[in-house]
Image (spheres, coloured by chain):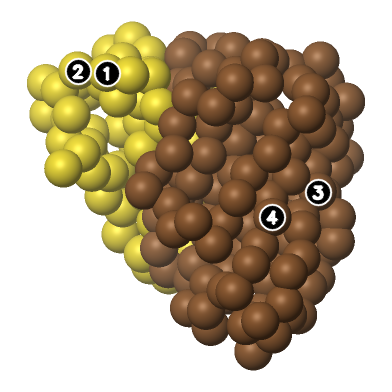
Chain colours: A brown, B yellow
């Protein structure tokens, strides 16, 4: 248990569906992240929020829409996805922003997404 | 483009031996270096971070950093079957965002 909870753990959706991934952190952290993990590829940073404000959007297609209502909750809204979007989506949080010494990033268990 | 390179493996090591995992990075301005472990079907978890040249030891794990040669390594002594996992190297860039390697799969054979 890392203190970062993601739901659902598994999601199968059609290309015309709308669904959302939810993340909640119980660690009192200020920064939250969405990552995409595909087989044999590096983790891809999608979105970063710091104190509820989006600070990074790494050229992610608009069919992925993040929402951060407060410092503890993060959503990823999914709409008209493509089969190549099938992957593990990881939510993470850290006390401060980014890769500073001692600023451990804690990951949730991930949401396995399959687009059919 | 800033990159972090790791051998994908699998790296097979006998139980009780030393496992050596390597990582090279391209951004000379990087200052912090992290090793995460990811078991199959699970999320990554931090093992160690290092930011000074030289060695840093924590139990059976030793991280080694050589900024001049732009590589960081992780040594696991007395390898156990429970160490079998994928090991991810992450390096910060000048904006303190982490750049990740694709990971090395380690298999410890009993």
Q: Residue at x 85, y 43 (%)?
A: A5
- Judging by the rendered image, the residue that carries numbered circle 2 is B29
Find residue A34 and report its image quarter: top right
Cα separation between marks 1 and 3: 30 Å
* Distance of label 3 from label 4 (alpha carbons): 9 Å
Residue position for label 1:
B94
Q: Position of residue B12 (x, y in %)?
A: 46, 68
Contact between labelled residues 1 and 2, with CB atoms less than 8 Å apart: yes
Residue B18 horizontal side relative to residue A9, left or right: left
Circle 2 SS class: loop
Q: The residue tagged with tag 3: helix, strand or loop?
A: strand
**Chain letter of disc 2 in the image:** B
Q: Say above or below: A61 vs B29.
A: below
Q: Residue under label 4, please give it.
A: A77
Give the chain of mark 1.
Answer: B
* Residue B107 higher or lower than B95, as above or below: below
């Amino acid at each position: 248990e890392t203190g970062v909870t993601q739901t659902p753990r598994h999601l199968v959706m059609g290309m015309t569906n709308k669904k959302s991934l939810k993340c909640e952190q119980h660690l009192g952290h200020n920064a939250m992240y969405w990552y995409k993990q595909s087989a044999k590829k590096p983790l891809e940073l999608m979105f970063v929020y710091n104190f509820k404000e989006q600070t990074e959007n790494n050229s992610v297609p608009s069919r992925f829409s993040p929402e951060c209502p407060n410092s503890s909750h993060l959503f990823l809204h999914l709409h008209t996805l493509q089969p190549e979007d099938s992957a593990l989506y990881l939510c993470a949080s850290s006390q401060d922003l980014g890769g500073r010494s001692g600023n451990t990033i804690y990951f949730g268990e991930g949401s396995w997404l399959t687009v059919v | 483009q800033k990159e972090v390179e790791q051998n994908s493996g699998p790296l097979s090591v006998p139980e009780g031996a030393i496992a050596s995992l390597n990582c090279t990075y391209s951004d000379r301005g990087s200052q912090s270096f992290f090793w995460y472990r990811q078991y199959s079907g699970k999320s990554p978890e931090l093992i160690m971070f290092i930011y000074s040249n030289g060695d840093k030891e924590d139990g059976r794990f030793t991280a080694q950093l050589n900024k001049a040669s732009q590589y960081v390594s992780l040594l696991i002594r007395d390898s156990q079957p429970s160490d079998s996992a994928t090991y991810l190297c992450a390096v910060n860039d000048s904006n303190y965002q982490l750049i990740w390697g694709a990971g090395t799969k380690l298999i410890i054979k009993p």
